[in-house]
Amino acid sequence: MSTDILFQPVKIGAMEVANRIAMAPMTREFSPDGIPGGDVVDYYRRRAEGGAGLIITEGMAVNAAGAHDGPIPLFFQEETVRASAAIASAVHDAGGKIVPQLWHVGVQDSPTEVNPTTVKQKPRRVGPSGLLGTGDLGGDTLDDNGIADTIADFARATRAARDAGFDGVEIHGAHGYLPDQFLWPRTNRRTDGYGIAADRTRFVVELIKACKAAGGSDFPFILRFSQWKTFDYDARLAETPDELGAILQPLADAGVDAFHCSTRRFWEPGFASDPRTLAGWARKLTGVPVIAVGSVTLEADFKESLSEETGGIAESAPRTKDIGTVARLIAEGEFDMIAVGRAMIANPDWANLVREGREAELRAFSREQLARLD
Ligand SMILES: Cc1cc2nc3c(=O)[nH]c(=O)nc-3n(C[C@H](O)[C@H](O)[C@H](O)COP(=O)(O)O)c2cc1C
């Protein structure tokens, strides 16, 4: 099958992306004191030069309480935003588009002291009910002021992204992090207006509206969501397409320009008894463009096992037959873009290799590659 369709432009809101290939967001922890340096700029530049139409950056923290433990970009610091502007500029020079992924871990991470130079007090983790998916306490329950402040932090980060020259934002609403904690009954036990019985989408709807107001209605807004959680691959937000629609439609109405549907295998059916993928369902149910992801050109999926030692990240040989499957699924209207994760760490020039028909040259992904910013 021809791969031409992978190299057709596509629009996400007001943003025109040159092709259908996105770099998936991947935390790399190479930003000491939360500030990405020249090595991080070059790392993203290489993927844009390698032909990816859209770069979605690693998760960047919107506030101290929501910052993952490790040297990730702390986007609530002015110096981080300034340093990130250099990433955006480098990607633009190479002809790509770029959005930062805005991240708040909620209670799903170990409490930590982030950047002691700017954050004096050890922040406590916060979530809708302070609960982890296991039922254990992971932090404090957000009260109404805490919710408003957290949403304001996402909105401020969106405005900062626009001012720094990014083309839009992606909100990390997947994998059991804060927005997902509100959507999931196991972590949202609230009995107020943000609870499951009243309206489980309320927090995310308010967040989207605040970010759209801060960034401007023409500033593209991508929402990443998933069924699975980082510590529970079998978890599900929605058991049926109807249930999925009841979650996604209010989010689409609030202003989502694209859904990024995070799955571990891009081709798998979203629900039993129908071959449509999760991304396909999101597109059919809402009419909003969708990005699919998961094990593209890799034999082994992202998290093969919940192994502590490997962080669940699987090594993998290349699997070139996926390229034809991706092209077919885009042609059939299943999804609009494909995000490539580990294969794009292993192959900064993934998109160019595919465009030139040189997929036989794709390199394997190994965990060693995570130790460097190649
Ligand atoms: C090292 C690494 C870091 C990741 N960090 C993030 C992240 O910050 N935000 C996110 O939404 N997903 C993150 N992911 C998940 C990827 O975006 C992607 O969904 C996953 O790797 C599956 O795609 P793949 O099979 O093509 O690698 C990460 C994955 C890897 C391998």
Image (cartoon, grey):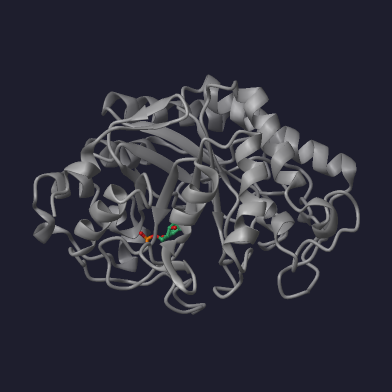
Q: Is residue 149 above or below residue 202?
A: above
Residue 50 visible, this angle: no
Residue 228 visible, this angle: yes
Left or right: where 49 falls relative to 2: right
Q: Quadrant of residue 215?
A: top right
Horizontal and vertical percent position of residue 321:
18, 64
Q: Residue at x 35, y 45 (%)?
A: 337
* On-image quarter of the N terminus: bottom left
The number of numbered badges drawn on the structure is 0
Q: Quadrant of ligand 1?
A: bottom left
Left or right: where 82 falls relative to 93: right
Which of the pair 361/83 is nearer the observer?
Answer: 361
Q: Quadrant of residue 301?
A: bottom left
Q: Is residue 199 above or below residue 40?
A: below
Horizontal and vertical percent position of residue 152:
74, 33
Q: Residue at x 80, y 61 (%)?
A: 139
Horizontal and vertical percent position of residue 5:
22, 43
Which of the pair 58/19 is nearer the observer?
Answer: 19
Horizontal and vertical percent position of residue 162:
53, 23
Q: Residue at x 75, y 40 (%)?
A: 150
Q: Is residue 250 above or below residue 96?
A: below
Q: Residue at x 54, y 73 (%)?
A: 233
Q: Quadrant of residue 325?
A: bottom left
